[in-house]
Every structure is written in structure tokens, then in C-alpha cells.
């Protein structure tokens, strides 16, 4: 077949389905195929170091005549040496690539003249820039965020993670010309590793009035008062939808970015909609105050509230609890609430009929749909957590000692009598009191509506318990099957629970394949201080079934 004779739109559809390496294999078929694929304008649209085993520039040089300046749109580089980055920037500059819209660089440093080389050709085309530099390297030049914003007026996304070059040991402080306003930036991530906590976030935020999503490293605002930060957000960020505060080891990403869309859920500027505060290492001394200020200001508009802190809820010295303040407010739009707190006594207080967390979830969030609790201890009734459980769709419990049969039945009792009110996603991780009775109740009341099921590292659960759980799900047709199941079981060195043999595992896999569309099953054996890990998935299992079928 003469590939070059096909219409361009058909060629485009064919090549789009091929990986980069598969396209290179097409080149080896014949000279005609080689010329066709190399002349395809999207062949070099995305340049990535992951596509080349050796130095990328050395690999590209023989094909330089095929790389049209307007064809290159995206660059993704992960290099260990600064000269590799320099050689690629020089290659692109020599080739006059002026249509690049996205650059993602992970490197030790970036030479100053390389920065201006790229700027010369891409200042008006670049709209997405991500820079990640090695922690602890303060000596080599790296273009500071304020310089980037001044030289790339069309930039919409800027992610900067790493140290900023500090001349003569002085701290970097962002500066802009008088009256400077960047009118296109929407998404900003800043983790300045060599900040001493005096980083002036105000200077950046004043210069970016159209920002919609902001993520800041907590080490950068250690000495910024919550009241000042709130005032800056209110005055200078009127379009802000999402704000995230992450600890120093955060990589600038959110676990589930789909929950934190940049697009506002309503057309009106109703205020902040997503608040994420992750401070596991107690970096920010005013964490409790900042959360209180932000939730008080935006409680009418918040859609997502995600808190992971060391000491945010209960302060023993002041005998106060942040959730006391939260429970006094009503969050009419809040649908997603996540709390991770390692304080073991936060729910054991006896000066209230209900704990602050219980009162908050039972009175303040009438439209809650997604609930995630981690490190939840005793002293609370789960049935009090949701005033109107008909709304609840997702339940995620991790390291929650409070959960047992009584707690599960209390919370899910109403769901079992109303088909429209049943949970669609359940995750149970590291729960010491999960028993066969708990699983049986979940299967009989929620099983037919489950889209996602996670049962992970619960010591009291065996392979027989999972089989019984599946048997209790009234599956009538494939439309009622669990969409995604992830089952992970652990076996300790105990004579009462022997590690299952191959026949038992095969039986389990066959049953899991019958009840779930997509699934993963993992067995961990810690007997004799040695770890045996067996992992299975629907992909490999069904491939083996198909292979055996055709071999008969």
C-alpha cells in the first residue's frame, strides 16, 4: 500500500492513534512511508525527552529539515545536566521555532541567555510554563517568576517549584514596574524552596488580577498573617476559584484535579469555591486562624473543603477547636469535605452533646455528597455526621478506629431503603474493626449501585470475607456490575489465617471478574518477616482467558 496516496485527513487520523515510537517504526517500512510520516506536521509537535533513549538534540539533528518552525508546539524536558537544556533551547532558537505554546522543564538550572533565547521567539505564543529546579541549588541562575511574567504577556499557566537564584545571598522579592498587570495569567503555582518565610505573596497577586487558581507553598508565607493574606485575596483576586496551601514537600499538584476545576460552577462571581489546606508538618503557625478566616469569608460559596493538618482542629492550650467555629456556619454549596487529623483526642471531648466534627457535619453541610475522613478516633456516632444522608454519594474512611458494624449501619441505614440515596463509591482503608458483618451489610444495602469499591489493608478481612461480600450483592445484569474494584488484603503470621492457596485465589479471581467490570486484587503476606506480594488485574486475567480459549 502506498501510504502517501491517502488523503491528509485520513493520514492525520491514523498517525494520531500511534505512539511516538510506533511512528518511528513506520519510518522503517519504506522510503515512501518514511517521507510521509516525517513530513506530517504533527510528527514533531510534542518534543519530550521520554521519547529518546539518548540525547534528544543529537537524535533530532538528522531530521532538522523536517522540523518546520511552526510545527513544534510543546516541549517536555527532564534532564540531569544543565547543558542538555541549553543545547535544546539553542536548537529551537536556531530553528526559529516561534509557535511553542507549552514548556515543561525539570532541570538543575536554566542559563540566563537561554531564557532570553526562548523569549525572543516565543514571547507571544507561550501560554503554559512549568519549571521545576533541584532543591538546594541556590548558586545557578534560574529566571524568577516576576521576570517570567514580565517577558511572557500571554502566559496563562505558570508553575515554579524550586529555589530562586539569590544574588549575594539576598532573598528574592518579586518586583514589577509601576502599574504592571498581567491580564492573562489564570493558574499560578509557587513553591520557592529557599524562601525564609518573608516571601511577599502580595506583590505577585497584585500583579495578577485575573488569577483563578492559586497554589502556594506554606514555607513561603510562614511570616504572613492570615488577615493580611485574606485582605489581599479579597482586594486583588476577584476571580479566584481555587486556592491551595501545600507543605514544603508538596509537588504543586492536587490528588484529584477534577474536583478542583478552574471553571466556575456558576456564571456569577460568587467567591472562592475550593479551599485546600495541607499542613502535615505544622509549617504555618497560623493555620487555624487562616482556615477560620477563609471559611467565614467564603462559607456561602465553598464547594470543596479539604483540610490535612497536624494541629488544626484541637488546641489543648486554649481548649478550643476550629470545628466549633465551622459548625456555627452553614455551607449551603459545600459538596465535598475531607479531613485528615492525627490528633487522637479531638473527638473525645465531653463538654458537648456532640463532638465539633459531628455538629459540623450534621448541621452545617446540608448538601454534602462526598465525605472523606482520615485518622478519625472514637467518641462520635457516624449516624450524626450527615443530616440528610440521601445526598451522600461517596464515603472514604482511612485509619478510622470508630468504624464498626454499629457505626456503618447507623450511617447507611437510610440508604438501604431508598434506591436513589445509595452510595456509589465506598473506600475502606486500614480500619481495624471491619468485619464480615460490616461487608455483608454494605453489599446487601449498597451493592447494586456501587460504581467504585476500595477495600484496602484491613487486617480483619480475609479472602473468604470478600467472596461472601460478593455473594451478597444482588447482581441481576451487567449494568449493575461494580465499575471499579480495588481489593488489597494483608496476611500476618497467624495460624488462624493461612495465606490462600492457588485454587482459592483462582476461585476469588473468577468471582471478582463476574461482579466487576474493572478490578485489581492484591495479596500481601508478612509471615516470617518476609513480604510476599501477589497482584492481579482484570486486564491480565481476561487476556489469559482469551489466550487459553484460542489454544484449545
Image (tube, rainbow, N blue to C red):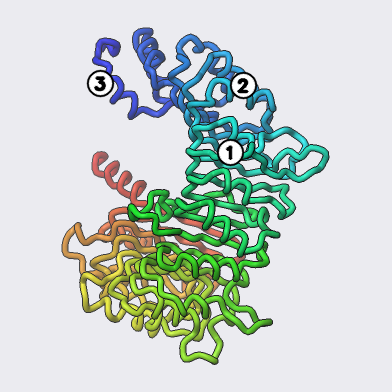
Residue 72, given in percent of the width and then of the height, sits at 46, 22
Residue 180's disc is 1
Residue under circle 2? 117
Residue under circle 3? 10
Q: Quadrant of the N terminus?
A: top left
Q: CA distance from mark 3 to mark 2?
A: 37 Å
Q: CA distance from mark 3 to mark 1?
A: 47 Å
292 with respect to 84 (left or right): left
- Give the residue displayed 51% in from the left and 72% down from the top: 399
- In the image, which is nearer the foreground, mark 2 or mark 1? 1
Question: Neighbour class for label 1 at 10 Å: few (<14), some, many (≥20)?
Answer: few
Question: Neighbour class for label 2 at 10 Å: few (<14), some, many (≥20)?
Answer: some
- In the image, which is nearer the foreground, mark 3 or mark 2? 2
Residue 419, given in percent of the width and then of the height, sits at 21, 72
Give yes or no for contact between labels 2 and 1 (Cβ–Cβ under 8 Å). no
Q: CA distance from mark 2 to mark 1?
A: 23 Å
Residue 394, given in percent of the width and then of the height, sits at 36, 66
- Residue 39 shows up from this direction: yes
User: Residue 493, located in which quarter of the rendered image?
Assistant: bottom right
- Residue 499 shows up from this direction: no
Question: Neighbour class for label 3 at 10 Å: few (<14), some, many (≥20)?
Answer: few
- Give the residue displayed 48% in from the left and 26% down from the top: 125
Label 3 secondary element: helix
Amino acid at each position: 500500500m502506498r501510504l502517501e496516496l491517502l488523503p491528509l485527513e485520513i493520514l492525520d487520523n491514523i498517525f494520531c492513534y500511534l505512539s511516538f515510537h510506533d511512528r518511528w517504526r513506520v519510518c522503517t517500512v519504506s522510503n515512501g512511508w518514511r517521507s510521509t510520516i516525517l513530513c506530517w506536521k504533527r510528527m514533531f509537535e510534542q518534543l519530550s525527552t521520554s521519547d529518546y533513549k539518548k540525547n534528544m538534540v543529537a537524535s533530532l539533528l538528522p531530521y532538522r529539515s523536517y522540523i518546520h518552525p511552526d510545527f513544534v508546539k510543546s516541549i517536555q524536558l527532564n534532564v540531569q545536566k544543565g547543558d542538555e537544556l541549553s543545547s535544546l533551547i539553542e536548537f529551537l532558537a536556531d530553528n526559529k521555532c516561534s509557535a511553542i505554546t507549552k514548556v515543561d522543564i525539570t532541570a538543575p538550572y536554566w542559563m540566563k541567555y537561554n531564557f532570553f533565547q526562548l523569549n525572543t521567539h516565543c514571547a507571544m505564543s507561550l501560554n503554559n510554563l512549568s519549571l521545576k529546579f533541584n532543591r538546594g541549588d541556590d548558586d545557578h541562575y534560574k529566571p524568577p517568576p516576576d521576570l517570567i511574567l514580565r517577558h511572557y504577556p500571554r502566559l496563562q499557566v505558570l508553575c515554579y517549584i524550586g529555589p530562586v537564584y539569590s544574588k549575594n545571598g539576598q532573598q528574592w522579592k518579586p518586583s514589577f514596574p509601576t502599574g504592571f498587570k498581567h491580564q492573562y495569567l489564570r493558574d499560578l503555582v509557587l513553591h520557592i524552596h529557599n524562601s525564609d518565610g518573608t516571601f511577599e505573596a502580595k506583590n505577585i497577586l497584585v500583579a495578577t488580577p485575573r488569577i483563578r487558581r492559586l497554589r502556594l507553598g506554606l514555607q513561603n508565607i510562614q511570616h504572613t498573617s492570615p488577615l493580611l493574606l485574606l485582605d489581599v485575596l479579597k482586594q486583588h483576586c476577584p476571580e479566584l476559584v481555587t486556592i491551595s496551601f501545600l507543605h514544603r514537600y508538596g509537588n504543586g499538584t492536587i490528588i484529584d484535579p477534577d474536583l478542583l476545576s478552574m471553571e466556575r460552577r456558576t456564571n456569577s462571581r460568587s467567591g472562592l469555591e475550593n479551599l485546600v489546606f495541607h499542613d502535615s508538618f505544622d509549617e504555618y503557625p497560623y493555620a487555624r486562624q487562616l482556615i477560620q478566616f477563609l471559611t467565614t469569608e467564603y462559607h456561602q460559596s465553598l464547594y470543596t473543603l479539604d483540610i490535612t493538618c497536624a494541629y488544626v482542629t484541637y488546641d489543648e492550650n486554649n481548649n478550643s477547636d476550629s470545628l466549633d467555629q465551622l459548625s456555627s456556619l452553614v455551607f449551603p454549596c459545600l459538596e465535598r469535605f475531607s479531613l485528615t487529623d492525627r490528633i487522637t483526642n479531638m473527638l473525645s471531648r465531653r463538654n458537648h452533646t456532640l463532638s465539633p466534627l459531628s455538629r459540623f457535619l450534621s448541621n452545617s453541610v446540608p448538601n454534602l455528597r462526598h465525605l472523606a475522613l482520615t485518622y478519625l478516633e472514637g467518641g462520635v456516632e457516624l449516624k450524626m455526621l450527615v443530616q440528610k444522608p440521601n445526598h451522600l454519594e461517596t464515603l472514604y474512611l482511612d485509619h478510622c478506629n470508630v468504624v464498626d458494624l454499629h457505626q456503618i449501619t447507623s450511617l447507611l441505614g437510610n440508604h438501604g431503603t431508598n434506591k436513589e440515596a445509595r452510595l456509589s463509591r465506598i473506600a475502606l482503608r486500614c480500619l481495624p474493626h471491619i468485619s464480615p458483618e460490616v461487608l455483608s451489610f454494605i453489599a446487601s444495602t449498597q451493592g447494586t449501585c456501587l460504581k467504585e469499591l476500595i477495600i484496602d489493608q484491613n487486617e480483619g478481612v480475609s479472602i473468604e470475607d470478600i467472596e461472601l461480600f460478593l455473594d451478597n450483592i444482588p447482581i441481576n445484569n451487567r449494568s449493575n456490575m461494580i465499575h471499579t474494584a480495588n481489593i488489597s488484603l494483608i496476611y500476618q503470621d497467624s495460624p488462624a489465617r493461612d495465606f490462600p492457596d492457588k485454587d482459592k485465589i483462582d476461585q476469588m479471581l473468577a468471582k471478582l471478574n463476574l461482579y466487576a467490570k474493572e478490578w485489581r486484587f492484591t495479596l500481601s503476606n508478612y509471615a516470617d518477616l518476609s513480604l510476599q506480594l501477589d497482584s492481579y488485574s482484570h486486564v491480565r486475567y481476561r487476556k489469559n482467558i482469551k489466550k487459553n480459549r484460542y489454544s484449545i
